[in-house]
Amino acid sequence: MTATTLSYGSHDPDAPNVHDASDNYLTHGQGLRSWLTTTDHKRIGVMYLISVLTAFFLGGVFALLIRTELLGPGRTIMDADTYNQMFTLHGAVMIFLFIIPGMPAIFGNFVLPIMLGAKDVAFPRLNLASWYFYIAGSVFALLAIALGGVDTGWTFYTPYSTQFGGQVIPIVFGVFILGFSSIFTGINFIVTIHRLRPQGMGWFRMPLFLWAIYATSIIQVLATPVLAITLLLLIAERTFGVGIFDPAMGGDPVLFQHFFWFYSHPAVYIMILPAMGVMSEVISVFCRKHIFGYRFIAYSSIAIAVIGFFVWGHHMFTTQSAVANVIFSALTFAVAIPSAIKVFNWLATMYKGSISLDTPMCYALSFIGLFAIGGMTGLFLGSLGTDIHLHDTYFVVAHFHYVMMGGTVTMFIAALHYWWPKMFGRMYSERWGRFACLLIFIGFNATFFPMFVMGSQGMPRRYYNYMEQFKAFHHSATGGSYFLAVGFVIMAVYLLHSLFRGRPAPANPWGGATFEWRCSSPPPHHNFDEPPSVGDCYDFSNLVYDKQVGGYVLKTPDGAGDSEAGR
Amino acid sequence: MSDSDSQRDRDASHQVPPRPPHLAHHFATSKQQFKSGKLGMWIFLATEILLFGGLFCAYAVYRSNHPEIFAYAHAYLDKTLGGVNTVVLICSSLTMAWAVRCAQRDQQRGLVVLLALTILFAFGFMGIKVVEYEHKWKHGLLPGERYRPQGLDDTPESSAETTAAAASKPASTTAASRPATSRAAGTFEERSRIAPAPRGPAGLADDAPDAKPRRPEVRNVHIFFGVYFLMTGLHGLHVLGGIVAIAWILLRARKGHFSSAYFTPVDLVGLYWHLVDMIWIFLFPLLYLIH
């Protein structure tokens, strides 16, 4: 390892850093047109950031409306039909428009080529097309809302979606188009990782974020087409009355569930794997310590992707045969193993590390706690006996919010803070960042922890009304959701504020050793004039903090900081 | 895919030859670009296989749930037209493969002619498909609620046994496999005349003594046509997509864009076209050649 790190000094790897800070990807080309026709992966990442955060805001508003309605039993602010539409739209928007495209499309696009020292992804035009498909799919989804909404639940189960359910076709068609966006991104990332790695970067020298993105892309590419055909069948059923999911016509509604979950269970790993990848980066950088068990983390990403394809039946314990149930239950337990391997490796990385509690690290810490709770309660649901009791209760709602929001959203925010200085060249307020993190952590637990209790006591999910005994839990959940909202608003304010008033970011504010910290903040249009030389991306021994630049710089052989590298 | 491969690509970049015009800015060498494109195409083909895989899976589920429907209804498909179409597609695959070879060997004229031939074959396939679809449409052999079979005795292939004829001699109606033997005069009103099965659906115990196929009781025949139209329809859309793609490289070939140094688009479109061909080679026996 020491031999490789020496190569930092040779070969003039820091030449890209001497770029004039005013000439970066943000200023390279002016006007809206230059953005809408760009094939620059960084700009596409930023365009995704804006559109995906808009969807997140929309989904968040739906969530707040749901929680407000549930302040009291019976009618509070909306009638039952509107409520059904609200939870459907909250689910559909959050899943298909926010969390599935979110991490890969934003951060994958922005940092993946830079982490490889490449100039762009393998197919830049396909990359732009993927963003347009995302927008087109979102427009159809919004059209469904504008035309009167959908109330099938985000899973579009038949016969709700074939015989009732409002504007099912626009939203289903929208999701179909979004699938293309996802596939294009996946193909791009797989090919980029295979073909554009720089000289000397073998598979086991890649940053772990890339392993996670690679595993995610495999799922995107192999699972999404099955969702596409399922949705086409659903549209055919609804428009032409094909009867393929209609038992009255010889069809099989359970087949829809199989098809749907064959995509949608692997899809939860599309959501969580990139979060785990960010975790591996953040935890190592902010502990100033080499990641523990690199190969185990890398392989466990692939293991999760592979096993994840064979556990879909655990969504159907109440609709399929006992033998299938036993098999799917066992496989579900198997997928817990690689997840646990990751958590233990992160904890081992922290052990005796020099931990600094910057905002991304605060989120990383809260991720460990929340993901542990979410993952463990997943085992309750994966075992047959308890699942029959807990099926379709608030326990399930709490479980997947702990994993998806406590896990993925937490790391999404961490990634946003971690790469914010790189993306926009500005530092946000560290104090407000930590404060918002605390608010979000408290608000999250106040919202979702009571749901575990409610669910185990029998409160069914998706119900408009509830019994007196659940009142206190619902109050806590609604109060917590307001806390969350305040936390997110504070975050939006200080992040936007930083764009205009923030301190200019140094090239390497956190002391990361991956390639993106070697080009200036924000990066120049072509990232690097010449691919940087590959070292160990988790070795921080030759990075020292330089007070003058306010960030980390490479140590030159004589021991002094090389200030030019830090610009 | 191996590291040494990509490493060699990069090593080659150090000699800095003049950049050919087709080489995108983010690739070091033409070879790296070609291999990236090829890998991307193969991954895309994998997604296509999974897309059709869903339909094949639906086919398997419905065929195992309702074997009698498939045995009965497939006789309405025209094996001759289907067979001709198979030959047409295989020929188009040949001309496509040949076109790629021409591109690799700088044979501009051959490339253009063969691409044009491929498009011609593709249109031939779609033309025959239109004839088949029109026949189904005319006779109401449509999916789901629109399944209203009528007037089928004007085609040689139709297994137009009427409900009445079948009911009069149920034992002889292995009509599906030998439609000609059970042809009956008069109109065909399969759906409307069927009363709900008086002794429960086929397969229950009281049917056991005469376990011969009981055609009048084949219910939900529309399922076969649902599967048929979805599978061949999606395949037909892919053929149309292929026509557009081949037309695009034909235009570029006429402008002389391709040579032995750069033939990536021809190669990739060729790969796609072979996949479309191959899917049909699975569809044909599964739908037309049952039993």
Image (tube, coloured by chain):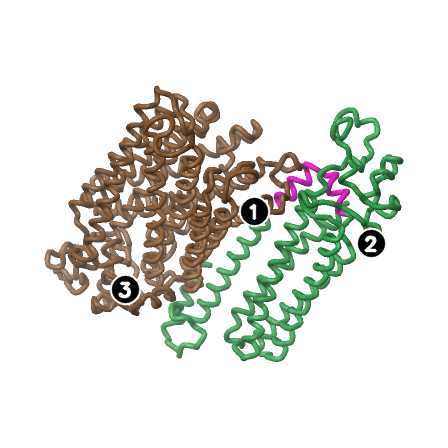
What residue type is disc 3 on?
Answer: Leu
| Residue in the foreground of this view, choosing between A278 and B251 | B251
What residue type is disc 2 on?
Answer: Thr
Q: Main secondary structure of the magenta part?
A: helix
Taking the magenta stretch, the answer to whether it contains residue B63 is yes
The kind of secondary structure element at disc 1 is: helix
Nearer the observer: mark 3 or 2; the answer is: 2
Crowdedness of circle 1 by 10 Å Cα count: few (<14), some, many (20+)?
Answer: many
- The chain carrying label 3 is A
Crowdedness of circle 2 by 10 Å Cα count: few (<14), some, many (20+)?
Answer: few
Tally of marks: 3
Residue A175 is tagged as: none
Q: Colour of chain B?
A: green
Q: Residue furthest top?
A: A469
Q: Colour of chain A?
A: brown
| Residue in the foreground of this view, choosing between A457 and A73 | A73
**Residue marked by disc 2:** B155
Quadrant housing the C terminus of chain B: top right
| Residue in the foreground of this view, choosing between B1 and B290 | B290
Residues at discs 3 and 2 in contact (Cβ within 8 Å): no
Q: Earlier in the sequence, mark 3 or mark 1?
A: 3
Say which residue appears at 40% left-offset and 45% top-offset: A93
The answer to whether any part of residue A206 appears in the image is no
**Residue marked by disc 1:** A235
Q: Left or right: where does residue A368 sit relative to residue B91?
A: left
Q: State the image coordinates of residue A453 (x, y, percent, origin top left).
A: 35, 24
Taking the magenta stretch, the answer to whether it contains residue B223 is no
- The chain carrying label 2 is B
Q: State the image coordinates of residue A236 (x, y, percent, origin top left).
A: 59, 47
In the image, residue A86 sits, relative to residue A219, either above or below, namely above
The residues colored magenta run B53-74
Q: How far apart are the alpha carbons under marks 3 and 1?
A: 41 Å
